Image: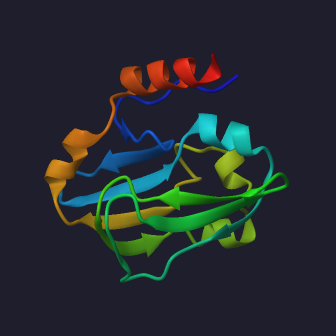
């Protein structure tokens, strides 16, 4: 069963989460629901620091025993950090999708884009609808 979605984040319809740091930067990862659908994650392809992405651009790739899935940027910006731990331990996403399993940090191009994302409650509703 998926863990509850933290209410201090916003969510995309593509199952990414964004934690706004309040200083023009944000941390991005995939949701617990997404890692559960992927099953065992065996490899994460991280972007280069300094890469600029627009909202909905692929920002990373996550490979599981089942498939390879793109991780899309829920907001646009510049990659300022990547979670290097995932290179050695991609399973951190399975173990702690909302914590140690974060994927990238970015400087937001337009903080207004955060308003286009879902709250935790709205995201939970989306997941329920997808299961039916």
Q: Is residue 50 left or right of residue 60?
A: left
Tell me which colouring the rendered structure shows: rainbow
Q: Position of residue 34 (x, y in %)?
A: 62, 41
- Residue placed at 71% from the left, 38% from the top? 37
Q: Is residue 64 left or right of residue 87?
A: right
Judging depth in this view, the residue of 61 and 102 nearest the camera is 61
Q: Position of residue 90 (x, y in %)?
A: 71, 61
- Residue placed at 55% from the left, 18% from the top? 128
Please give the count of numbered marks on the rendered protein. 0
Placement of the C terminus among the 4 image quadrants: top right
Q: Is residue 89 above or below residue 87?
A: above
Q: Is residue 52 left or right of residue 81?
A: left
Placement of the N terminus among the 4 image quadrants: top right
Judging depth in this view, the residue of 106 and 16 nearest the camera is 16
Q: Is residue 129 above or below residue 84?
A: above
Q: Position of residue 36 (x, y in %)?
A: 71, 37
Q: Residue most toward the right? A: 65
Q: Quadrant of residue 45?
A: bottom right
Q: Quadrant of residue 111?
A: bottom left
Q: Position of residue 24 (x, y in %)?
A: 19, 60
- Residue placed at 77% from the left, 56% from the top? 67
Q: Is residue 98 left or right of residue 110?
A: right
- Residue placed at 59% from the left, 53% from the top? 101
Q: Is residue 38 above or below residue 68?
A: above
């Amino acid at each position: 069963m998926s863990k509850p979605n933290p209410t201090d984040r916003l969510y995309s319809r593509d199952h990414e989460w964004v934690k706004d740091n309040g200083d023009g930067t944000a941390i991005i990862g995939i949701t617990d629901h997404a890692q559960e659908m992927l099953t065992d994650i065996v490899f994460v392809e991280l972007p280069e620091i300094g890469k600029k992405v627009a909202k909905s651009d692929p920002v990373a790739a996550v490979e599981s025993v089942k498939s390879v899935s793109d991780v899309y940027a829920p907001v646009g910006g510049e990659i300022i950090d990547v979670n290097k731990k995932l290179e050695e331990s991609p399973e951190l996403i399975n173990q702690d999708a909302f914590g140690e399993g974060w994927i990238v940090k970015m400087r937001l191009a337009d903080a207004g884009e955060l308003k286009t994302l879902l709250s935790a409650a709205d995201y939970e509703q989306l997941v329920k609808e997808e299961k039916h």
